Image: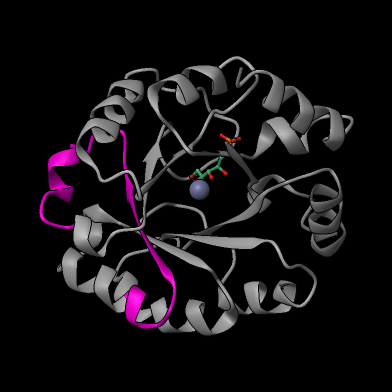
Amino acid sequence: MLICPSMLSASFTNLGEELAAVERAGADCIHWDIMDGNFVEAITFGHRMIAAHRKLSQLRFDAHLMVVNPERHIKNFAQAGADVISVHAEVCKDLHHTLGFIRLLGKKSGVALNPATSIEILEYCSDVLDQVVIMSVNPGNSGQSFIASQLNKILELRKTLPQSVEICVDGGITDQTIGDCVRCGADSCVSGSYVFRSQSYVDALRKLRESCN
Ligand code: DX5
Ligand code: ZN
């Protein structure tokens, strides 16, 4: 199980330090929540933020694009050094083409699905797909409660997707919810507030790992 802290919950006055701290604590990958004030209400960071931090870490960078017209931004995030780029299926005009384009740029392709979006939208995309991000909260904010109905989605996807496609769960991940995600077949989990609001990032990551068993 890969644990991916989300920088959305880190201290914005100290992002470089925060990144180094979760890396030292044993994070497997760094999740960047890109919000455009349109697909979701909030505005967070753009590709330059990823480029600036790319120099500080060798960890996998996942860019979760919560933006409309994601096609316009993919090249910038690829050049900035994101390793995985996930777009929301709800706003992709031509999902298969967009995923293929991400791969063409040498990156792993991801699709994020809102809680109310059915997995049927992924049919005929598995040949260009590396990761599915199951949103277990509605996108836009950290610190929300896990939506348990999404566990079914993980189960269904694990049955239907090729084993090579990674299933990532994003939102409301704590030591209480991560175990169910693993048991249903998740390969990675994003954790924002649980990790960054803890007293010790080492303890938080250890507790999450222990709860996977
Ligand atoms: C929500 C974001 C999540 C968020 C998770 O829109 O996509 O990645 O940062 O935060 P927690 O873990 O606090 O739910
Ligand atoms: Zn996210």
Q: Give the range drawn in magenta.
A: 102-125
Foreground: 138 or 25? 25
Image quarter of the N terminus: top right
**Foreground: 35 or 198?**
198
Residue at figure coordinates x 37%, y 39% from the top left: 134
The x and y percentages for residue 171 are 51, 34
Q: Position of residue 153 (x, y in %)?
A: 28, 28
Q: Where is residue 14 in the image (x, y as percent from the top left)?
A: 85, 59
Q: Quadrant of residue 209?
A: top right
Nearer to the camera, 147 or 83: 83
Question: Is residue 23 left or right of 80 when viewed as pictured?
Answer: right
Q: Does the magenta stretch include residue 93?
A: no
Tell me residue 152's x, y (percent): 28, 21
The residue sitting at 70% across, 74% down in the picture is 54
Image height check: is 172 above or below 61? above
Where on the picture, by quarter, is residue 156?
Answer: top left
Query: Quarter holding the C terminus?
Result: top right
Residue at 17%, 66% in the rendered image: 96
Q: In this view, does 163 lie to the left or right of 41?
A: left
Instruction: In the rendered view, tell whether residue 179 sits above or below residue 9.
Output: above
